[in-house]
Image: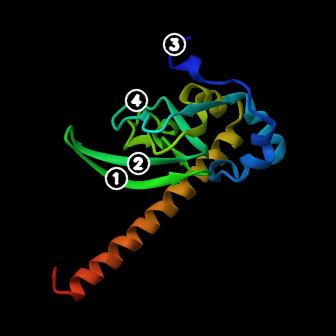
Amino acid sequence: MNRRQNKFSPDIPEQVRSDYLTTIAAFARLAPHRLNRLLPYLHIRAFAADETIYNQGDPPGAAFFLLSGSVNLFHEESASRRDRIRVVAAGASLGHAALLPAAPQLESAIAVEPVRVLVLLRADFDTLIIKEPLMATAILQGVLEEVLENARVAFTAYWGLTNQLTAANIIV
């Protein structure tokens, strides 16, 4: 076991079990009996405020599902320039690249405050694909719905800002 893995807790507290898991978009499509079968693949991990969860470009080791706290997602243009994409809170997922084959992390994630997350390791997701393909597909569908909703919100904000700048003759 490597040093990073020993920070995980294998025990999922009762309050995090099936009822709570359905509030996380990635797991909302799963029936209760599937949620119970998912639990052995999930781990809990805590991060302190300002602790890096992962960096842009990192290999996709795990997907994270926020139980509490909030996380800043950043795009890093260079070592000296970091642009905040958005803040995510409890119920959101991040590190989606871990659920895709050979895709690096697309952004950096840093805890705003103390954070607790459920962690689905890439290796465990690969096992789910083989042993529980319907469950893996449902998780991917839930994550995709969340990603598409985030893209829709960003696109709407972008066009709203573009229209305001155009109306003010700042851009043409």
Q: Residue at x 56, y 19 (%)?
A: 5
Earlier in the chain: of badge 2 and badge 3, it is 3
Tell me if I can see residue 30 in this picture: no
Q: Residue at x 41, y 73 (%)?
A: 156
- The residues bearing labels 3 and 4 have C-alpha atoms spaced at a distance of 16 Å
Label 2 sits on what residue type?
Leu
Circle 3 residue: 2
Identify the element where label 2 is drawn.
Answer: strand
CB within 8 Å, label 1 to label 2: yes
| Vertical arrangement, residue 129 with respect to residue 160, above or below | above
Label 4 sits on what residue type?
Pro
User: Residue 67 in the image: x percent, y percent?
Assistant: 64, 44
Look at discs 3 and 4 and give the one toward the viewer. 3
Circle 4 residue: 59
- The residues bearing labels 1 and 4 have C-alpha atoms spaced at a distance of 21 Å
CB within 8 Å, label 3 to label 4: no
Earlier in the chain: of badge 1 and badge 2, it is 2
Earlier in the chain: of badge 1 and badge 3, it is 3
